[in-house]
Each structure stands twice: as structure tokens, then as C-alpha cells.
Amino acid sequence: MRFRDRAEAGRQLARRLGHLLEREPVVVGLPRGGVPVAAEIARELKAPLDIVLVRKVGAPHRKELAAGAVGEDGITVENSFVLQGLGLSWEDLSDQVAKERAEVVRRAVSLRLDRERIALAGRTVVVVDDGIATGSTVVAAIRVVRGLGAREVVLAVPVAPADAIEQLDELADEVVCLQTPVQFSAVGQWFEDFRQVSDGEVRALLDAHG
């Protein structure tokens, strides 16, 4: 089953997350595509909405393949399986890592503007993306919110490969995923409308749900 768009996926996820309402959670989305999904969850849970900045570090000559990820607060995730398969070390990707770290900083300024990050210490935090391929960026996001003191981390995504969910089950306190298809090539294949989300749309959603 394909989702009509990110908003519909968010509404479906929200119906699976109603038990969190009494915990007064904070919802954080991964820009850009995860934010429209997260906004629908925040609306249903009557929760504040924030973002967590992470960037995939693509493999040389295969940028779509995640060799790892970087995130806010100096977080680093190395995909050892991909690195070993390509015969590379993390140090071999130092230029790409530096570029993506700079992009994390740039996006934080562009998307948050003067908005303060929502304090996560002692809170239940719902980490949301529009789907998972390798899982590297979501792992980075979970580590960021853990580092900010989240008491409980719930990962919510519309679609992901089953093996990625098994890995993430060990990192998050709870994982909610609507579909884990056996045949999986890209997140976008599971959406009828998977157009790119703009920075302006992200800022507008943050303003509406912050």
C-alpha cells in the first residue's frame, strides 16, 4: 500500500501513537521530508514540534549510498558494513564529512532562525522521518536527542526495510513503522506524492506547531 503523501502518512502514524498523549511528548522531525510527517503527529498529540539536524555522508561516486551520517552536537555514525564493502575508512571520507557538518550548521540557522531548541531533558521524544533506507541518519538523530537528555525515545516512520527496524529496535525505546516491505529500493516508491519539501515549508510548519 502506498501513502498519498507525507501528511497522510503522518496521520496514520499518529493513530498508532495515541498512547503517548498522557506523556506530553515532544515531536522532532528530520528535515526536510520528515517534518510534514512529524507535524501531523504533533497536531494529534497536542505536542510541540522541533527539528533534529542530521546529514547523510554518501559513499564516493555513489552519493545515494550512506556510508554514515553526522548530526548536531558533533554526532557521528559510521556505517561499517558499507565502509568495509567499499574498502574505505571513515578518514577516507573526511572531506565529505566536513562538508556535511557545515551543511548541518547552515540548515540549523536557516530553518530555526531565532527559534530556541525545545528542551528535551527528561521528556518523551518522538523522532520522525518520512522513511528509512539504511538507517544511518535516524541513528544519528536518536543519538542527538539522547545526548540532549531525552528520557524516552520513540521512533516513528511510515516505511522501512525490516532489517533496518531490527537494528533500530535496539536504539529506541519504541519503534512504530507502518510498513516493512520485503522488496525495498527507495522510500519515494511508497508515496504517490513525494515532491521535495522546501525550507520555507519547514519553517511554516515549525511556526504553526512550535
Image (cartoon, rainbow, N blue to C red):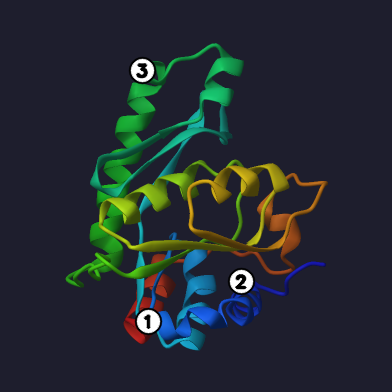
Rendering quarter of residue 99: top left
State which tag comes first along the sequence, 3 or 2. Answer: 2
Residue at the image position 34 percent from the left and 25 percent from the top: 95
Q: Residues within 10 Å of mark 3 (few under 14, many from 20)?
A: few
Q: Position of residue 65 (x, y in %)?
A: 59, 34
Q: Which residue is the site of mark 2?
A: 6
State which tag comes first along the sequence, 1 or 2. Answer: 2
Q: Which residue is the site of mark 1?
A: 24
Q: Residues within 10 Å of mark 2 (few under 14, many from 20)?
A: many
Amino acid carrying mark 3 in the image: Glu
Q: Secondary structure at mark 3?
A: helix
Q: Is residue 83 above or below residue 185?
A: above
Amino acid carrying mark 1 in the image: Glu
From the viewer's perspective, tell me whether residue 38 is left or right of residue 105: right
State which tag comes first along the sequence, 3 or 1. Answer: 1
From the viewer's perspective, tell me whether residue 65 is left or right of residue 181: left
Residue at the image position 40 percent from the left and 22 percent from the top: 93
The image's mark for residue 104 is: none
Q: Residues within 10 Å of mark 1 (few under 14, many from 20)?
A: some
The image's mark for residue 91 is: 3
Amino acid carrying mark 2 in the image: Arg
Q: Position of residue 104 (x, y in %)?
A: 31, 48
Q: Are marks 3 and 1 in contact (CB under 8 Å)?
A: no
From the viewer's perspective, tell me whether residue 93 is left or right of residue 135: left
Compute the Cα span from label 3 to label 1.
41 Å
Q: Position of residue 96 (x, y in %)?
A: 38, 29
